[in-house]
Image: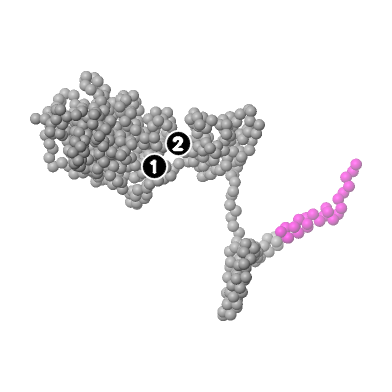
Amino acid sequence: MARRPLPRILSSGSASITRSREIARTAADSATDVLHPLITVVRGLRLLAVSGRQKWVATPKERRGPKLFLGAACVLVVALVPYGPILALITVMGAAAWKGRERTPVRTGPDETETARLRSLYEALVPYFSTADDPDPLFAHGGDWAKAFDGYAFDDGRLTRLQVSYPAYFTDGEAAARSRIEQLLHTKSGRGREYHFSWDEEANRLVMTVLDALPTTIAAQRFVTAPGETVLGFTDPDAVSRTVPVRDGDTTVDASPVVWRTGGRSTEPHLLAVGHPGGGTTTLIRSIALQALQNGDVIVVDGGGTGEYGALAGRTGVLAVESGLGGALATLEWAAHETERRLITANRARQNGHPVPDDIRRPLWILLDRPGVLGHLAAADGRPDPQELLRIPLRHGRAAQVTVVLAEQFDALDTLTETVRTHTRARAVLGPASREQIEAVLGVEPHTTPPSEVPAGRGYVRLGVGPVLRLQVPATPDPYDDATSEAHRQAVLGLLPDRHSSVEAAPAREHADEGPATEQVPVAVDTAARPVDAVPVEAMVAEARPSEPLAKAQPAGAES
């Protein structure tokens, strides 16, 4: 069949019709540009009218009369004022133009890239949050991810917050099941960041958030604390309910501290810090020493022999800084006798109705770094393990105002004695560590994903049976180290007490098995304070409970 030709008007007039459409479209665009202010004002007047009508409808009927009278009075005043109607018209037109302006639409949903990431997370969670017996599964391959993800937030295309609703039959009470979900979300959401997971078992809801990095620019300084409080470091703002003002460079900010309370009323009187080399355990001990010297005496035993505590030698309040085996044993033996003397003296004072002497109330801090090294040397030389000399300070130190702080590395964690493990209920893990290593020290896993690379002094802390908190130790380097910046060096040197005017003589020691001691401490107990027929300390510990303010303690004199 031959094709019938189109009518002449359709074949010849197509070009003119196209030109007419273009002319009409151009005229409409030009008219829209010319009339755009009028369109904006009309739109604003309509919105103002709708808003006024809504307010009028929402007004109770008993209030409509007074409002109507007030409006009429305002109109009358405007009409009587010179140039009042013109000013009122200008005001209304300006309000209408502002109300009717075009606003940039707010994006309410994810874009294509974010949708693809959310769908990928949903599909990855299906094997963990679904069973074959569920008639209406919340998680299913090809299902609707919007039903499972109640909330989400992105920053530059990366997920920063995700709220997941999971079925009630998921075993969220098992640590292994929760750990699998956390590891999956961490892997799928992007590595290199630290995620916090909050499980709401009652509502079957999991909230994952990306944590901000803890500040590393806060250096050692005087912190606003009460007697018996020590700032271990700083943590997330929502983890603690307290802030302290600190200097961060040239500015003063409010930081959230991790405060460790010691003394007679403390439930965690001793601390154990564990980490890898370079993790920051020595920095933590140095920071604690600077704070303890404000109102107490300090004994430092450097088992590693690295000389990191040389700046403390000879300072007021520093009774000894030892690095050799012989000096460490003598110092720790004196500390054990001093603990006994304090308990006996405090008990006798209470029995006689007298206040506890000032030398008993002054805190004594025993800081021991790398005790495993000293224990190995002692075993090779046939001497007692230095940790055995800590038995009395650890067991009865709280009543005698004696605090013990130990730092050890992961590779020597098995060398710690049972007494040390039992009585160091305040724990800290610094440096890079796996979840298993953190759980072995703190007792529970953290609710965050430990990053593989962290700055020095960064880790986790747990005080007793409390929650696991992120921790960043204030920068407290060795001021005599060449790699220390000038600002940090001056900050540490400014906190150190003055040096002794004279050094007391000490009994002679063996020189074949130890390095040079920076300060000598007598190891025998004062015969006047501890007579031969004194009651053993084990029978008097229950009555030795000091409760008065802290003051200075003096070492026992050497036997003649």
Looking at the rendered structure, the kind of residue marked 2 is: Thr
User: Residue 53, how many percent across, how many down?
Assistant: 64, 64
- Foreground pick, 80 / 476: 80
Q: Earlier in the sequence, mark 2 or mark 1?
A: 1
Main secondary structure along the magenta-highlighted residues: helix
Q: Residue at x 55, y 43 (%)?
A: 152
- Foreground pick, 402 / 384: 402
Q: Residue at x 61, y 66 (%)?
A: 96
Asked if labels 1 and 2 touch by Cβ distance under 8 angstroms, the answer is no
If the image is split into quadrants, where does the N terminus sit?
A: top right
**Does residue 481 appear anywhere in the picture?**
no
Crowding near pointer 2: few (<14 within 10 Å), some, many (20+)?
A: many
> In the image, which disc is placed on residue 235?
1
User: Residue 41, how many percent across, how many down?
Assistant: 63, 66
Q: Mark 2 highlights which residue? A: 448
- Foreground pick, 434 / 112: 434
Q: Residue at x 58, y 29 (%)?
A: 127
Answer above or below: position of 509 versus 61. above
Q: How is the image coloured?
A: one colour
If the image is split into quadrants, where does the C terminus sit?
A: top left
Looking at the rendered structure, the kind of residue marked 1 is: Thr
Locate residue 338: give its quadrant: top left
User: Residue 268, how many percent across, how many down?
Assistant: 33, 36
The range drawn in magenta is: 1-25
Answer above or below: position of 172 versus 146. above
Q: Is 16 inside the magenta-drawn segment?
A: yes
